[in-house]
Amino acid sequence: MDRAHLDVLHAHLTQVHQLLDQLSDAVRPPHPAAGRHLAAARTRLWQAIAEVHSAFHLLPTVSRDRTDASECHPDRLTEGPPVLTICQRHLAAGHSVRRKTTPTDLSSPLPAHATACAR
């Protein structure tokens, strides 16, 4: 596991988070209970995203000792180095989370499963 893998995972999780955000907003008016479950899933997913972001920063960076001509030079990328990309993505997703989620929601335990599963 390296930073590149965590960056890709973070990107996928933030996309799923955006999808859950849209679904919970669309489902909530006609089906409030289902909307609440989707909103809870969105909150839990944000917690996972935050942990992936933290893990990304705890992994060592790639050594820049090599001067191979085929080596990737992220500092020359127009969008900036990957570390900035993941942080920018995380900050953007965080703005959405803060608009719709309280700090209490983010730290609360998972709610009990209150629906009956039908076969």
Image (cartoon, helix red, strand yellow):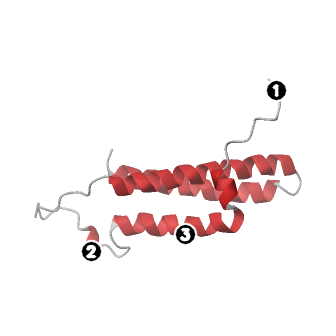
Mark 1: secondary structure:
loop
Q: Quadrant of residue 111?
A: top right
Q: Which residue is mark 1?
A: 118
Sooner in the amino-acid sequence: mark 3 or mark 1 = 3
Residue beneath disc 2: 76
Q: How many marks?
A: 3
Indicate the amino acid at tag 2: Arg
Residue at image coords 84%, 47%: 33
> Where's residue 74, x and y in %?
28, 68
* Amino acid type indicated by mark 1: Ala
Quadrant, the C terminus: top right
- Tag 2–tag 1 contact (CB < 8 Å): no
Expressed as whole percent of the image width and height from the top left, the position of residue 73 reads: 23, 68
Q: Residue at x 18, y 61 (%)?
A: 71
Mark 2 or 1, nearer chain start: 2
Q: Is residue 20 visible?
A: no
Badge nearest the viewer, 2 or 3 = 3
Q: Position of residue 70 (x, y in %)?
A: 16, 62
What residue lies at 36% left-to-right and 58% top-to-bottom?
A: 57
The local crowd at label 1, few if under 14, some if 14 to 19, many if 20 or more residues have their Cα within 10 Å, is: few
